[in-house]
Amino acid sequence: MTKAISLALIVGGVLLLYFGVQAYHSLSSDVSRVFTGSPSNKAIYLMAGGVVAALAGLIGLATSGGRR
């Protein structure tokens, strides 16, 4: 994986995490927590996707150090 792709994954992961936190604190997520006890699926998917993308980017940066 090239460094550019890894950096793009990290940036995308951070953005997904940001939007996931925003969705977690939204009115619809609050209503969902009142009735089901858990946040909305959208918030969970955005945060999980952000974590996966950021980890993939970090692993890509760590493993592409020796190649040219």
Image: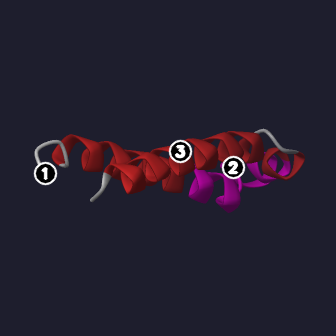
Work out whether mark 1 precedes mark 3 in sequence or the reverse, and give the earlier one: 3
Cα gap from disc 3 to disc 2, whole angstroms: 24 Å
Q: Residue at x 45, y 52 (%)?
A: 9
Asked whether residue 42 is drawn in magenta, I would say yes
Q: Which residues are magenta?
A: 31-47
Asked whether residue 34 is drawn in magenta, I would say yes
Characterize the local packing of mark 2: few (<14), some (14-19) or many (20 or more) Cα atoms within 10 angstroms: many
For mark 3, what is the residue? Answer: 11
Give the quarter of the figure containing the N terminus: bottom left
- Relative height, residue 16 to residue 21 (above, below): below
Query: In what element is the residue under mark 3?
Result: helix
Question: 53 left or right of 22?
Answer: left
| Residue type (three-letter) at the residue carrying disc 2 | Pro
| Residue type (three-letter) at the residue carrying disc 3 | Val
Magenta-colored segment: predominant secondary structure: helix
| Residue type (three-letter) at the residue carrying disc 1 | Arg
Q: Residue at x 61, y 55 (%)?
A: 46
For mark 2, what is the residue? Answer: 39
* Picture disc at residue 67: 1
Cα gap from disc 1 to disc 3, whole angstroms: 22 Å
Residue 17 point in image, percent of width and height: 59, 43
Give the label, 2 or 1, closer to the camera.
1
Looking at the image, the residue that sits furthest to the front is: 68
Question: 66 left or right of 6?
Answer: left
Residue 44 point in image, percent of width and height: 60, 53
Q: Residue at x 33, y 49 (%)?
A: 3
